[in-house]
Image (cartoon, helix red, strand yellow):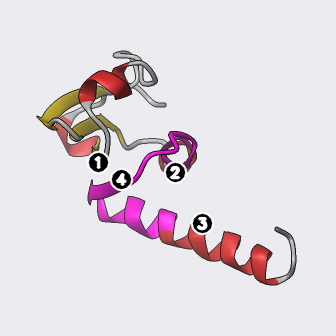
Amino acid sequence: MAGVHQQGDQARVVLHQSREVMLRTIPPSAATLEAIDDAHCLMLCGAGQLDSLVYWLMALDVDFDVLEPPVLKERLRRASERVGRSLARGGG
């Protein structure tokens, strides 16, 4: 994952897993994790490489909610549509 960038260039994503669990997967050099409660944490990371961030969010194998930036939601939507088309063609 891209390292933490300036505030205006930051992604904010709620991960549906505790901070303690996610710290085993996400190094501090990649993102800042803030506890929300026992089952969720807030991930703050650079949004400069959105395609890489889409990949990493999917690779984490945890549910998540993108708070910002809106363009990250759009990139995820397009990736989801691409997967859906692949599955509809029998690719999965």
Tell me which segment is drawn in magenta. 56-76
Q: Earlier in the sequence, mark 3 or mark 1?
A: 1
Residue under circle 2? 54
Corner quadrant of residue 20: top left
Q: Is residue 68 visible?
A: no
Residue 52: percent from left, percent from top: 55, 42
Disc 3 marks which amino acid?
Ala
Residue shown at 18%/38% (left/top)? 7
Crowding near pointer 2: few (<14 within 10 Å), some, many (20+)? some
Q: Could you tell me how far apart the alpha carbons at marks 2 and 4 are, in whole angstroms?
A: 11 Å
Residue 26: percent from left, percent from top: 42, 24
Q: Earlier in the sequence, mark 1 or mark 2?
A: 1
Residue shown at 34%/16% (left/top)? 28
**Which residue is outermost to the front?**
38
Q: Could you tell me how far apart the alpha carbons at marks 2 and 3 are, in whole angstroms?
A: 8 Å
* Residue 53 relative to residue 4: left or right: right
Q: Could you tell me how far apart the alpha carbons at marks 1 and 2 are, in whole angstroms?
A: 11 Å
**Contact between labelled residues 2 and 1, with CB atoms less than 8 Å apart:** no
Tag of residue 64: 4
